[in-house]
Image: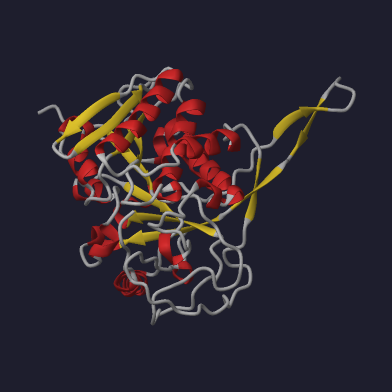
């Protein structure tokens, strides 16, 4: 994930909220910023509302459940620097082999500086559109990039397992971007191909989703925030989307309330119950004007889709404003926070499942036949 400076965004967002009466399901009291490049920090004040950004628990239900074992197996296998051509080739071989084991038919898409990996599972309704899930697999020099961004790759591979053979109205597409750290080169090459753009209903990009911290002051913010920070703990997952596609952004973070079934102790009947799993809170950040006034929020692989007018969200743990291992040799899988990572993966799976099954949740794209 590239550098973040969001102070300008905060000012623009607050101005937009004040001028428009607020965002749907995204209270302005919850707007924060995350910056990778601004190393200055502010001792955040405790939230005025003690209930803000508290972890909630989501019932286990008929949504497919992620495997923590699988997630960490992928992290372990990718626990090496993925910067040079041979290193990135090694990562590609692992990703392609895992997809093939799961019945997918991945394609290597070359561009001048690297190679993207693309795979799709067709939906049952031709005109329902597609949901694209993306993450970059390259790293900076001297970092194994467990959080940045093997965490995103691992979630996609787990989604490929649990959603790959489930028929849904919408098509599920997967893309693993190369050369994100060199300037979004992989996603720019991907979005330059009209065949990839014509049927998209929405895009979900993950870039660092594996680190949470729970001590006071571990979550940092830029100086001079125009609002009181909602939390000084890194216990939330940030979801960033353009304001033109709020339904996609608002697909995240709604607790699921469907009960599952279980046999009773005698095995003769079934009883309804709710079993809870802790998940991080979700902080939704709507960005006005596709980030034109805030270019520093465009530094990950969601941005090229915004340029094309496609709804896309970036999901992140806020990078160096939280983790001390950002772009360092210490960004290894042993420093991933297990509970946060599993919970984040489940949130993404739940939202993706809804988007794939409910074609009414987003505007159906119009195919370009020219």
Q: Which residue is drawn at 41% across and 39% down?
A: 153
Residue 191 can be seen in this image: yes
The image quarter in which residue 359 lies = top left
Point out the residue furthest to the left here.
Answer: 370
Picture layout, residue 3 above or below residue 258: below
Picture layout, residue 317 above or below residue 8: above
Q: How is the image coloured?
A: secondary structure
Residue 232 relative to residue 182: left or right: right
Asked whether 257 or 189 is in front, the reply is: 189
Q: Residue at x 29, y 61 (%)?
A: 297
Q: Where is residue 318 in the image (x, y as percent from the top left)?
A: 43, 60
Q: How many labels does the image show?
A: 0
Residue 110 relative to residue 200: left or right: left
Q: Residue at x 29, y 31 (%)?
A: 117
Point out the residue furthest to the bottom here.
Answer: 224
Point out the residue furthest to the right here.
Answer: 266
Residue 366 can be seen in this image: no
- Please state, as top left, top right, bottom left or bottom right, where the C terminus lies in the image: top left
Asked whether 208 or 361 is in front, the reply is: 208
Q: Where is residue 69 in the image (x, y as percent from the top left)?
A: 59, 35
Picture layout, residue 83 above or below residue 280: above
Picture layout, residue 99 above or below residue 59: above
Asked whether 75 or 204 is in front, the reply is: 75
Q: Position of residue 163 (x, y in %)?
A: 48, 27
């Amino acid at each position: 994930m590239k550098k973040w400076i969001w102070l300008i965004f905060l000012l623009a967002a607050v101005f937009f909220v004040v001028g428009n009466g607020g965002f749907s399901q995204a209270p302005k009291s919850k707007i924060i910023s995350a910056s990778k490049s601004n190393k200055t920090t502010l001792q955040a004040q405790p939230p005025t509302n003690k209930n803000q950004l508290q972890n909630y628990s989501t019932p286990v239900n008929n949504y497919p459940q992620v495997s923590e074992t699988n997630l960490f197996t992928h992290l372990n296998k990718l626990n090496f620097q993925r910067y040079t051509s041979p290193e990135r080739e090694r990562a590609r071989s692992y990703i392609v082999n895992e997809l093939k084991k799961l019945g997918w038919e991945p394609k290597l898409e070359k561009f001048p500086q690297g190679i993207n990996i693309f795979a799709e599972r067709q939906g049952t309704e031709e005109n329902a559109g597609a949901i694209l899930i993306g993450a970059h697999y390259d790293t900076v020099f001297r970092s194994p990039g467990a959080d940045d961004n093997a965490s995103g790759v691992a979630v996609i591979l787990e989604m490929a397992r649990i959603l790959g053979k489930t028929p849904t109205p919408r098509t599920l597409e997967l893309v693993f971007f190369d050369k994100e750290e060199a300037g979004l080169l992989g996603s720019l090459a991907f979005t330059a191909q009209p065949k990839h753009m014509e049927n998209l209903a929405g895009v979900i990009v993950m870039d660092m989703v594996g680190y949470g911290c729970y001590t006071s002051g571990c979550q940092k913010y830029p100086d001079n925030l125009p609002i009181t920070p909602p939390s000084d703990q890194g216990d939330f997952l940030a979801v960033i989307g353009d304001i033109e596609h709020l339904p996609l952004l608002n697909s995240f973070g709604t607790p699921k309330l469907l009960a599952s079934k279980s046999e009773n102790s005698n095995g003769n009947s079934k009883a309804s119950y709710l079993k809870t799993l802790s998940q991080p809170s979700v902080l939704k950040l709507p960005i006005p004007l596709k980030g034109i006034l805030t270019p520093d929020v465009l530094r990950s692989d969601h941005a090229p889709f915004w340029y094309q007018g496609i709804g896309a969200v970036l999901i992140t743990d806020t990078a160096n404003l939280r983790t001390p291992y950002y772009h360092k040799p210490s960004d290894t899988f042993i420093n991933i926070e297990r509970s946060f990572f599993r919970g984040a993966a489940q949130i993404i799976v739940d939202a993706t499942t809804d988007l794939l099954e409910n074609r009414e949740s987003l505007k159906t794209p119009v195919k370009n036949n020219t």
